[in-house]
Image (spheres, rainbow, N blue to C red):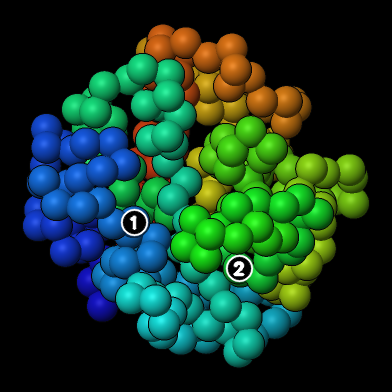
Amino acid sequence: MKIDTKYCVLDDVGCGVFEQKKYKYGKTINNLPYKDPDKFSKKLYEYHKELWNGRNIQNTNNLCLELDEDGYGGYCLWLNKIKITSDYIGPSTYWANNIGILDEEIGEYLKSTRTIGGHLIWPCKSVHTGEWIFNKKTKQMEKEKKSINTARGGEKGFYDRIDLTLLDLKNWYECRPCKLKIFFDTNKEWLNIFKSFPGFIEFFLLQDFVDKNYNIQDLASYNDEKDIYEILKSIDNPMHRETKSSYRKFISGNKRVIENRNNRIIILKMKQ
């Protein structure tokens, strides 16, 4: 299967070709109700299956992911009994909107970051957080459950920043304290497939998110003139101190590594 690294998966959710000028945050694409590609894009899941199946993993069998419908109108992958879903690793539209960045600017970066290079896969086995939430569908209070994907978002996670998530994951692999430990522990059957943090990075073509020693690049520190990053030293999240200017810097840094990852995907497919 040919993978088009310039294909925007927002084109594949039943709303026609994505036009950034018609994007309305959290509401519509081309004046049609917004649908999340991580749930509804079949092509995205086909791309994931094509990319990760058959990839060499040291001292273990290659992955054999199976594409399936999730029973709720969307899609998922399975590795034996492990259910896996896609996760967008580009700049958060929620936090961009929250800080006052306009819809058209958000739509502009989505056009390039909602490509295959802007997505990762996680197992979705969830954990009770110990808190209670109101379920809008059942209109009842219920115990909150989160997966790695959902736990890394929001104020209690990493505001969906993939660089912070990767630093926390590195700490887990290296048996150091980490914020999402309970979620990583619950999904260790999947994470242990890759043996180590470098193994995870190499398998998923995330080399541009780290330096040669697998230190995490701080995407918010991006210097576009020199095309360099500072090393991320802490999982402390400064979102409450962000301005439009500083978040735009993060957007630029995040876009750049996704562009580089797409180039790695092209090279990988050319070699196969």
**Mark 2 Cα shell of 10 Å, populated few (<14), some (14-19), many (≥20):** many
Question: In the image, which disc is placed on residue 95?
Answer: none
What residue does disc 1 label? 36
Query: Regarding mark 1 in the picture, which secondary structure is present there?
Result: loop
| Position above or below: 120 against 113 | below
Which residue is at a point 34% across and 56% down the rendered structure image?
36
Q: Position of residue 2 (x, y in %)?
A: 23, 71
Closest to the observer, 98 or 131: 131
Image-based side of 85 in relation to 261, left or right: right
Image-based side of 252 in relation to 149, left or right: left
Image-based side of 25 in relation to 162, left or right: left
Closer to the N terminus: mark 1 or mark 2?
1
Amino acid type at mark 2: Cys
Quadrant of the rendering where the C terminus is positioned: bottom left
Which of the 4 quarters of the picture holds residue 24?
A: top left
Counting every numbered tag in the picture gives 2
Which of the 4 quarters of the picture holds residue 155?
A: top right
Q: Position of residue 224 (x, y in %)?
A: 39, 17
What residue does disc 2 label? 124
Quadrant of the rendering where the N terminus is positioned: bottom left
**Mark 1 Cα shell of 10 Å, populated few (<14), some (14-19), many (≥20):** some
Closest to the observer, 126 or 192: 126
Closest to the observer, 231 or 56: 231
| Position above or below: 248 against 146 | above
Amino acid type at mark 1: Asp
Q: CA distance from mark 1 to mark 2?
A: 16 Å
Which residue is at a point 11% across and 32% down the rendered structure image?
21
Q: Residue furthest bottom?
A: 80
| Position above or below: 34 against 96 | below
Q: Position of residue 80 (x, y in %)?
A: 60, 89
Q: Position of residue 29 (x, y in %)?
A: 17, 47
